[in-house]
Amino acid sequence: MESYLFPFDSLICMLLGISFTVWFTLLLVFIIVPAIFGVSFGIRRLYMKSLIKLFEWATLRMERGAKEKNQHLYKPYSNGAEPEFDMSDIFYFCRRGVESIVDDEVTKRFTAEELESWNLLTRSNYNFHHISTQLTALWGVGVLIRYGFLLPLRVTLAFTGVGLLVVLTSIVGLFPNGRMKSYLSDKVHLMCYRICVRALTAIITYHDRENKPKNGGICVANHTSPIDVIILASDGCYAMVGQVHGGLIGVIQRAMVKACPHIWFERSEVKDRHLVAKRLSDHVADKSKLPILIFPEGTCINNTSVMMFKKGSFEIGCTVYPVAIKYDPRFGDAFWNSSKFGMVNYLLHMMSSWAIVCSVWYLPPMSRMEGEDAVQFANRVKAAIARKGGLADLLWDGGLKRGKVKEVFKEEQQKLYSKVLVGSSEDCSHVHGWC
């Protein structure tokens, strides 16, 4: 019996060895090596165009199926009497009515952006793939492609990129400070971030690169997802700012800071505004250090708006380089709803999406004008980012995502409402269109 099994086991091992060799050879030739040199074969762009054609066909088929389904919503009796009515027929209208009541310009920024059409992802709409047999079959094929091919490929690339980042930055950290170390650090960071970008099949279009952030400044951008960092860092090098973590993230942080002067704060230091401001000021004062990357909103917003910028990074008194980031939700929802999904679950969603498509605009550098305080400067920068990215400019604090409305805001609304009740028409004509 053993004499018959041994050749079979050897054949299995040989086939597995050949499969892994072919797999990693393809990764090396078509993904890792192009990432090292910053070139692209145009495969991702072609892939994106093919997906657009597929989505257009699916949308037309969905609309046709939905129309046919709605035509049979009310079925006449066989004797030509009154149409049939089912209690479930009112649920749609009830849901839309309740949504209209609870919908507002703040809370809807903390949920996923609603798509006008189906992108063949289950989580975008749970009903579309049941409209027709063709769409159901297409959705099933999509699941096999995304989870059977794309997900393993992306996980492999992600581990490759993160592993190389930890190992190579640790090696670069052994070099003495100087131009050679800075040069190697920049190359290592760019290479590893570009590999990580390919792990998401990210298709990024950069605009106005002549305005890219320069040393001695602060780069501020709207914040939709943790991958915003990778999106920007794959086109330029930045000094990161953040809290010290443990686990895998802590290992990455300790390795990165050996090669480049990133700014990590202990948990006890984060709330010390003066200490944070001093660390940032000392960094930007050294023109040899990389620009600092900051997301002033302090939380992730769902790619439809820009919310209030915290004033801390605008008090430093240095040049600010605004950047606008806008994702295309048709290929995958990049928004991280941290109150609903953990980091691992979120990354699984990202890596099982079709692709991450976005545009990045580098805006001209901005400086604080004479007589302008930090809050006014922050609002001016925020407005510029919102205009460029086609986003709504909101004054609300993104902290409302987790906290309650401050008493100050409540009191302001109460005062406005009291004017409506007892004041003149001149006092209340500007309040939400009342009076």
Image (tube, helix red, strand yellow):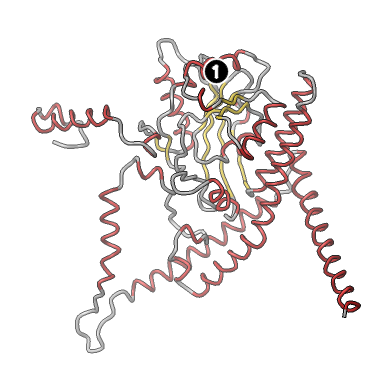
In the image as oriented, which residue stretches furthest toward the top?
370
Residue positioned 47% across, 73% down in the render? 132
- For mark 1, what is the residue? 319
Location of residue 153 with respect to 312 vertically, above or below:
below
Measuring from the top left, give residue 401's x and y in whole percent: 39, 39
Residue positioned 28% across, 48% down in the render? 102
Location of residue 233 with respect to 9 vertically, above or below:
above
Q: Residues within 10 Å of mark 1 (few under 14, many from 20)?
A: many
Q: Quadrant of residue 301?
A: top left
Measuring from the top left, give residue 135's x and y in whole percent: 51, 70
Which quarter of the rendered picture does the C terminus lie within?
top left
Residue positioned 91% across, 77% down in the render? 3
**Quick check: 308 left or right of 430?**
right
Which quarter of the rendered picture does the N terminus lie within?
bottom right
Give the residue type at disc 1.
Thr
Location of residue 47 with respect to 169 vertically, above or below:
below
Measuring from the top left, give residue 287's x and y in whole percent: 65, 15
Location of residue 358 with respect to 309 vertically, above or below:
below
**Quick check: 168 left or right of 309?**
right
Could you say which is closer to the camera, residue 9 or residue 44?
Answer: 9
**Quick check: 280 left or right of 7?**
left
